Amino acid sequence: MANIESAIKRARQNVKKAAHNRKYKTTAKESIKNVTKAISSGKKDDVTMLLNVSKKNILSSASKGIIHKKTAARKISRLQRKVNSFLKTA
């Protein structure tokens, strides 16, 4: 454990920041899972709506610096490809 006052404060801040970042990461991951579940269940109307929500969550976490911008672009691209191939077959 830290002994210096500034190190103690930094440890407290790190705990708060980690919880904040975790919230954004989990919402992005859950939204991706929701899209893939909708694809597997065959709900065409839900897929496009959930895709937009998922894009919004991923981009917001990237803009806050929680995930890298290129990681966000990769995740959105892969998700969009899945949705496009689903919509072509459906």
Image: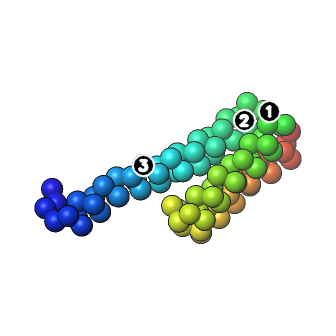
SS at mark 3 in the image: helix
Q: Is residue 74 visible?
A: no
- The residue that disc 3 covers is 19
Q: On the rendered image, what quadrant is the N terminus found in?
A: bottom left
Spatial CA distance of label 3 from label 1 is 33 Å
Q: Viewer-proximal residue, 71 or 64?
A: 64
N-terminal label among 3 and 2: 3
83 sits to left or right of 37:
right
N-terminal label among 2 and 1: 2
Q: In the image, what residue occupies the spot 29% across and 63% down?
A: 10
All told, the count of numbered labels is 3
Q: In the image, what residue occupies the spot 34% across and 58% down?
A: 14
Is there a contact, CB below 8 Å, between mark 2 and mark 1? yes
Disc assigned to residue 56: none
- The residue that disc 2 covers is 38
The amino acid at mark 3 is Ala
- The residue that disc 1 covers is 43
